[in-house]
Image (tube, helix red, strand yellow):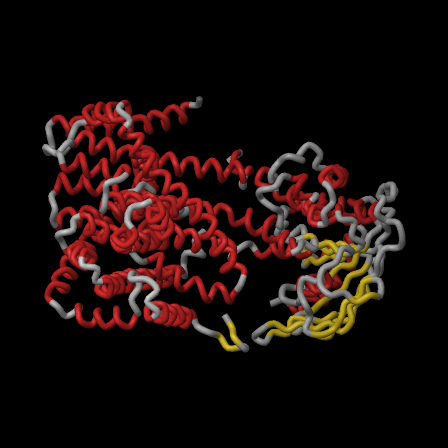
Amino acid sequence: MQIFGYRVPNAMSLLLWASAWEIVGRAEITILLPPLSSALGRLLEIVPTETFLAALAITLQAYFLGVGISILIGVPLGIIMGRSAWVDKLILPWVSLFVSAPLTALVPVIMVLFGFGETTILLTVVLFAIWIIILDARAGSRGISQSLVEMSRSYGATRWQAFIKIYLWAALPEILAGIRLGFVRAVKGVIIGQLLVSVVGFGYLFEIYSSNFLMEHMWALLMVLFAFAYALDSGMGALERRVEYYSANRS
Amino acid sequence: MTAPGPQSASTAGAAAAVGVRGVSMVYPGPVQALQNVDLDIPGGELTTLLGPSGCGKTTLLKIIAGLIQPAAGTVLVNGRPVQGPGPERAFVFQDFALLPWASVIRNVAFGLELRGVPVSEREAVAEKYIAEIGLVGFERKYPHELSIGMRQRVGLARALAVKADVLLMDEPFSAIDEQTRRKFQEDMLRLVSVERRTFVFVTHSIEEAVYLSDRIALLTPRPGRIWKIIEPRLSRALSPDQIRREPAYLDMVESIWHDLKHYVE
Amino acid sequence: MSRFDYRSTALRVASVGIVLAAWEYAGRVPVSIAFPSLSDTVQSAAQMVSDGSLIRALGITIVPLVIGIALSTVVGVLLGLATGLSRRTEWLGIPLFLVLQAAPLAALIPMLVLAYGVGLASKVLVVCIMAVPVIVLNSYKAVRYTPVSLLEMGRSFLGSRRQVIFKIILPAASPVIFAGLRLGTAAGFVGAVLAELLISPTGIGDLITYHQSVAEYPQMYAAIASVILLSAVFLEILDRVEVKLFRPERRAI
């Protein structure tokens, strides 16, 4: 946007909201919202502590492992679905169902089957992330131009070669878009998983803070999570943009 | 060509004349799209803006339509300067700009709908023009069910339906295949003789310009300028097919091509 | 029906059948004590419907959900319109909503529930917080990127600002807005269920945790399946509403 002809960057908007937070917090309008500065202060306090770092380690581990598994299973599955009509018809109804279902409701199932530990969190992450990754990989795969397919066959590529050298790259923009959404959903997954299995990771910390009404601590934690999610999302966005250059030119 | 058909009810008085005075347009860059353009567009005739890509012809057309504000200069319609779009001018878009969620009849009546004309009245007008462009029976269809050529005709009917004096057409046939295009050009000739309005046509096809126009303004790019005015003066008594084989027609096309050759990238 | 149609229906039936059969088998084996068979689950579902507990629970969950989604839709679309139409509002609102959308807003739920309880108002609040960001962002995107040629056409035929918004921008934007509503509804469901799972005792979440705590797994699974089915039904209704009200041309597709 422009003020008096000067371009104001979007980051300034966030600064504006941050100041608003500070003011509202100082005015003590609600117990739920402490001033930004005190939450930041607590943040600096908590981060170096052992409890926090342990919780962070558990969370990051479950997160990246979970996303990794989702990508390793989801992308190939999506691509296969895009190329094979009968696999697609068989699996798509379930993927469509689960991509917009309240997966939160399924977490108790995972909990009773796998206990109250890290495995459950890991599976929750996979549960949340995998469906959108499959769907977008499928979309990318379906969008692969027929000419590319015919070209690969006429030059004698094996199924494996075609997959690695052509299909993966042709579908890459959509695949990355799906992975980006998967990252965001995985964050929700790891948090929700930990909230429900409250003896592990950040869920445990949340439990302690909330039951003791330590609002500043809660917000400090929330800020860490929000910043993490945002950074991940922006990072993926940047990656997507680098790949985007050829997506417009695909026939 | 067959004798002109009955006059349409819209031509009550003389058709409007358009005057372009000193129009310049600059885009950020800076790119001088148009420089000091002066042009007279006589009423009741079809004038074409012809030139290669980048010569500013669509920009000029949109300035006349009032969709773009020029950096300098004015546009006069019947001697009065215009700011922005007006009821006396109607625009036909290159990509049709039809509402995909509306039926053909609603699309044709859309200009009237925006003016607050009641439903039954505007649909009656729309039906008349749907018949005139030859799409009877398609009133309830949606744009995605029509061929490209049909969609273009809907856009044209919409512009006709608002009974504007000046019709501005932005490369209306460029998206259409060759065979259909020739047919449309012939229909266009018939339309111009029947409707007696002022038509301003933009194209990059020399044949199309010579075939259809009473007057051609040749534009050249960088910066966009009017370079030459040509009046084909082809005999309208000839049939459409005969015109295309007339030596006068062929010679004119060649000479314009020769002139424009310098400016093709 | 052509041969192709038979095949695709057959495949769809097979797909459902395989999963259901696998479920039944896994339950019989049993894969785990905590994994009931399909037939047990269906049986307990029927029983819960007949004694009213399932319907009552779903009812308690649905009310704040519907209210919350309705509110979120109105607020979200209005905000999306405002940010899509004005650069100033865009600058003010969109960076904030981008952060909110990527963030795990679910983390706020324990706090909210703790402070405001699990009454109707706080549940509605939870649903709104989960749903509004994605609705706003989708509506914004749809409005901001209305095809220029349609806008020009509206201007060329002398449409007023109000006419252009209601007759051109909103209908053109409706597919993406509805995509946002779908995502928002899904997020709202997550919010409602999570709030109930975390701090009961209300609604379907309570039913789930209760049966879980007394190890009555068929009932627990039945409750879970019911909420998943409910959300699928909701989304289907949303689809139908969209086609009926806004995009009649899609009926033909």
Residue C105 in view: yes
User: Residue C174 in the image: x percent, y percent?
Assistant: 51, 46
User: Which is more toward the observer, C214 or B34?
Assistant: C214
User: Residue C39 in the image: x percent, y percent?
Assistant: 20, 23
Residue occupying image coordinates x 17% and y 68%: A46
Quadrant for the C terminus of chain B in the image: bottom right
| Number of numbered markers | 0
Residue A79 in view: no
Quadrant of residue A95 within the rendered picture = top left
Q: Is residue B63 above or below residue B92?
A: below
Residue occupying image coordinates x 69% and y 46%: B113
User: Which is more toward the observer, A23 or C4?
Assistant: A23
Quadrant of residue B80 within the rendered picture = bottom right
Quadrant for the N terminus of chain B in the image: top right
Left or right of B118? Residue C115 is left
Residue occupying image coordinates x 14% and y 57%: A58
Residue occupying image coordinates x 35% and y 59%: C100
User: Which is more toward the observer, C121 or B227?
Assistant: C121
Most distant residue in the right direction: B13
Q: Is residue B124 above or below residue B87?
A: above
